[in-house]
C-alpha cells in the first residue's frame, strides 16, 4: 500500500462549501517507505468560524487569528504533496478544497487521490457504516482529539495499518489499485454534493430524490446507482437531495 510516497491528509474548514468556505487547519501523515512524518498547522481563513464548527473541531476564531493565511503556506504545501498519492477519508472533500485553495492563489494542483471510505467498503463489505467515527470504534483506534486535522489523518493511517495486519498487505494494495484504476467520474462535482452521493447506500431499496424535479422509486430491483446517475445528470435540478428507507 505504501510502496509509493503517500500523503494522508485531513482538512478542517469553516464549512462544507468549497466555493464559499475556507481551510482552518491542515494535518498530514507523509509516508516514504519506513519513514513517517507528521505535520499540522492552523490557517487563518480570513472569515469567521461558525459556532457549530468551533464546537465540533475545537478550533476557535482566536486560535486562527494569529495563524498565517493559506497563501503564505501554499508553495511549501504544494512541494510537500507533489508526486505523492493523496489519501483522505472522503477524498473528494479534501482534494476539492485543496484544489480550490491552490487555484485561488494561481497554483495548479493535481494528484492521484484514494478515498479511504471507498477502500474500507471494499475491505470490509460486511459492515454498513464506514465513516471515520465508525472505523475508530470498530477497530479500537484510540483518538482523543477527533475532528482535529492531524488526529483524523492519523486515524486513517492507523486504520490502513490495521487492515494490512488483518487482511494482508497484498489485499489492501490490490483493493487500492482497483479503486485508483476507476475513472474519476465525479471529479467535477462540488464537494458537498459528492458527500451526499457518497452517503447514498450501495444496495437496492426504497429511495426518493427531492428537488424542483423529483423522482421516486419503490422497486427493490432498481439499484440505487440509477439514482446516483440521475442526481449527477444534467436533468437533475439544483437542490436535489436523496433519502432512503428500508
Image (spheres, helix red, strand yellow):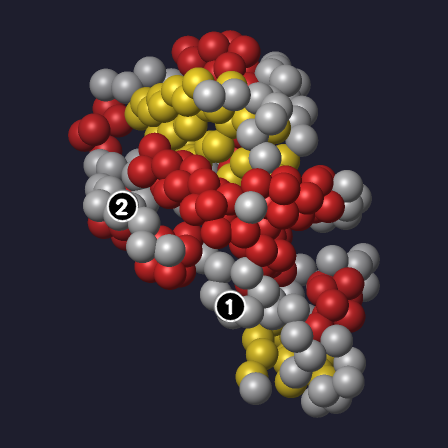
**Residue under the point 49% across and 59% down:** 130
**Residue under the point 74% across and 58% down:** 232
Q: Is residue 5 left or right of residue 174?
A: left
Q: Nearer the viewer, residue 27 or 140?
A: 140
Image: 135 above or below 31: below
Who comes first in sequence, dot 2 or dot 1?
1
Q: Nearer the viewer, residue 27 or 176?
A: 176
Asked whether residue 196 appears in the rendered view, the answer is no
Image: 30 above or below 209: above
Task: State which quarter of the image contains the C terminus.
Answer: bottom right
Q: Quadrant of residue 58?
A: top left
Question: Which residue matches tag 2?
Answer: 143
Q: Is residue 141 left or right of residue 225?
A: left
**Residue under the point 38% across and 29% down:** 27
Few, some or many C-alpha atoms within 10 Å of disc 2 (few <14, some 14-19, many ≥20)? some
Residue 226 is labelled as none
Q: Nearer the viewer, residue 107 or 155?
A: 155
Image: 160 above or below 135: above
Question: Which residue matches tag 1?
Answer: 127
| Residue 28 spot, x, y in % from top left | 42, 27
**Residue under the point 69% across and 79% down:** 204
Amino acid at each position: 500500500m505504501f510502496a509509493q510516497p503517500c500523503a494522508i491528509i485531513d482538512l478542517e474548514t469553516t464549512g462544507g462549501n468549497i466555493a464559499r468556505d475556507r481551510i482552518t487547519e491542515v494535518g498530514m501523515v507523509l509516508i516514504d517507505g519506513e519513514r513517517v512524518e507528521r505535520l499540522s498547522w492552523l490557517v487563518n481563513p480570513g472569515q469567521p468560524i461558525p459556532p457549530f464548527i468551533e464546537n465540533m473541531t475545537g478550533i476557535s476564531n482566536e486560535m486562527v487569528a494569529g495563524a498565517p493565511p493559506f497563501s503564505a503556506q501554499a508553495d511549501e504545501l504544494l512541494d510537500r504533496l507533489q508526486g505523492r498519492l493523496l489519501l483522505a477519508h472522503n477524498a473528494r472533500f479534501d482534494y476539492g478544497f485543496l484544489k480550490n485553495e491552490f487555484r485561488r492563489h494561481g497554483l495548479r494542483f493535481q494528484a492521484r487521490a484514494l478515498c479511504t471510505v471507498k477502500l474500507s467498503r471494499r475491505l470490509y463489505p460486511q459492515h454498513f457504516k464506514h465513516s471515520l467515527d465508525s472505523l475508530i470504534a470498530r477497530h479500537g483506534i484510540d483518538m482523543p482529539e477527533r475532528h482535529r486535522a492531524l488526529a483524523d489523518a492519523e486515524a486513517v493511517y492507523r486504520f490502513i495499518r490495521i487492515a494490512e495486519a488483518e487482511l494482508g498487505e497484498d489485499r489492501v494494495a490490490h483493493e487500492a489499485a482497483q479503486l485508483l484504476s476507476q475513472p474519476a467520474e465525479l471529479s467535477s462535482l462540488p464537494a458537498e454534493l459528492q458527500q451526499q452521493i457518497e452517503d447514498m447506500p450501495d444496495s437496492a431499496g426504497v429511495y426518493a430524490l427531492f428537488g424542483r424535479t423529483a423522482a421516486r422509486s419503490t422497486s427493490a430491483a432498481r439499484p440505487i446507482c440509477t439514482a446516483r446517475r440521475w442526481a449527477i445528470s444534467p436533468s437533475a435540478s439544483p437542490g436535489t437531495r436523496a433519502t432512503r428507507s428500508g
